[in-house]
Image (spheres, coloured by chain):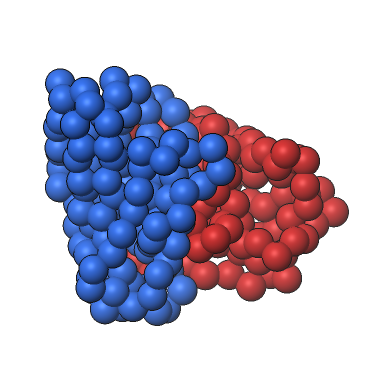
Chain colours: A blue, B red
Amino acid sequence: QSALTQPASVSGSPGQSITISCTGTNSDVGGHNYVSWYQQHPGKAPKFMIFEVSNRASGVSNRFSGSKSGNTASLTISGLQAEDEADYYCSSYTSSSALLFGGGTKLTVL
Amino acid sequence: QVQLQESGPGLVKPSESLSLTCTVSGGSISTFNWWSWVRQPPGKGLEWLGEIYHSGNTNYNQSLKSRVTISADKSKNQFSLRLSSVTVADTAVYYCARVARNGLDIWGQGTLVSVSS
């Protein structure tokens, strides 16, 4: 199975909002609400941010939100801060009980 | 709280097997959770390798299925990864993680495994 599709990079200025997309198929993203999002700073392990499309993990700022339409899930970060600069990955379980990741998106805060 | 820690050799020779163990502390692996392995080649993205339930049920990445084995030792509160016939392409940081809420909510710090002669 192919990885989920994410843009390679996005950027925004402090205070702005950005959205990262994650596109899959009817067998994964579009088939159920099992999409998660992770934040990864350089040299660190990924951090669980969003689960089941739109639920924030414990301790995650409400500036982070998730949504889904059809086969595409999205992560929106509002009020961008310098500390948000990181790589972001989406994941989705598939109908065959496999976990797929997106290729990752590098967020640059200008 | 639950913490995960990977351990194992940092260097493996080509064609040999890579073996890593994940030790779970602060909680039991015999809970209603699956336990997973993920890897990340240098400068690249995340790749799911597979997962195990404490009963021994497993799910694997089909692209690696013939080379991957994940097992669990409830007595030691550990689960393990074995990847056979490794090549340079298997050089990566290997993470263990807990599956919860249909995602990976707790991760180990990761361990770099290099494949080189």
The residue located at (67%, 52%) in the rendering is B79
Which residue is at the far right?
B75
Q: Residue at x 29, y 20 (%)?
A: A82
Does any portion of residue B15 appear in the rendered image? no
Residue B25's spot in the image, x, y percent? 75, 40
Left or right: residue B4 versus residue A110 is right
Which one is in front, A56 or B23?
A56
Q: Residue at 15% across / 42% down in the picture? A: A8
Image quadrant in which the C terminus of chain B is located:
top left
Residue B114 vs B28, above or below: the answer is above
- Quarter of the figure with residue A72: bottom left
Q: Residue at x 14, y 32 (%)?
A: A11
- Is residue B101 something that shows in the picture? yes
B47 lies above or below A59: below
Q: Which image quarter: residue B29?
A: bottom right
Residue B21 in percent (x, y) is at: 64, 44
Q: Position of residue A15 (x, y in %)?
A: 22, 26
Q: Position of residue A56 (x, y in %)?
A: 47, 49
Comparing A104 with B50, the one in front is A104
Q: In the picture provided, is B19 more to the left or to the right than A54?
A: right
Query: Taking A23 as reference, is B81 above or below it?
Result: above
Q: Quadrant of the N terminus of chain B?
A: top right
Task: Please indicate whether residue A3 sits to the left or right of residue B94 in the image.
Answer: left
| Labels in figure, total | 0
